[in-house]
Amino acid sequence: MTVKKAIQILDWWIGHKKETMETLRKEWHYQTYEEATGVAKLLFEMDKIDISNMEEIRKELVPNCTHPKKMRDRDPSGQWYCMNCNLDL
């Protein structure tokens, strides 16, 4: 798996968690997540922690690289990538 695919998977997963939380909030007729009680509050708090953790992992995966031309190369399939950060270009 390339770094780019891992970032895409994390983006999808974060979006899915946020959509699920919003759907549950609407179905359970809460105006905000803070007014939830019991199991609903527990689920919302767990999802918030999961989203926070995934966003931190994403920050670590996204390189702080300018992809200099001298560090660019092609893999056998013809895809350009950065040899400095290993990100597909």
Image (cartoon, helix red, strand yellow):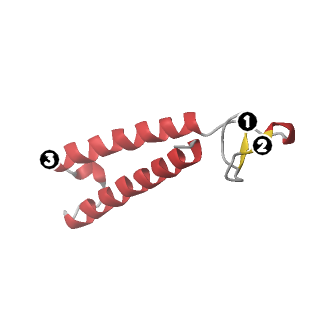
**Which mark identifies residue 83?**
1
Q: Where does label 3 land, which residue? A: 39
Q: Is residue 36 left or right of residue 80?
A: left
Q: Residues within 10 Å of mark 3 (few under 14, many from 20)?
A: few
Q: Percent from the top left, x then y, of residue 58? A: 52, 40
In x, y percent, where is residue 31?
28, 61
The answer to whether 27 is drawn above or below residue 88 in the figure is below
The answer to whether residue 59 is seen in the rendering is: yes
**Location of residue 27 by image quarter:** bottom left
Q: Position of residue 50 (x, y in %)?
A: 35, 41
Which mark is first along the chain, 3 or 1? Answer: 3
Q: CA distance from mark 1 to mark 3?
A: 47 Å
Task: List the residue tagged with mark 2.
Answer: 73
**SS of the residue at dot 3?**
helix
Using residue 23 as the reference point, say whether residue 5 is left or right of it: right
Amino acid at circle 1: Met
Secondary structure beneath label 2: strand
Count of number-bearing discs:
3
- Measured along the vertical axis of the image, is residue 83 above or below residue 19? above
- Determine which of the numbered discs, if any, sits on residue 41 in the image: none
Dividing the picture into quadrants, the one containing residue 52 is: top left
Callout 2 touching callout 1 (CB < 8 Å) = yes
Closest to the observer, 82 or 46 = 82
Crowdedness of circle 1 by 10 Å Cα count: few (<14), some, many (20+)? some
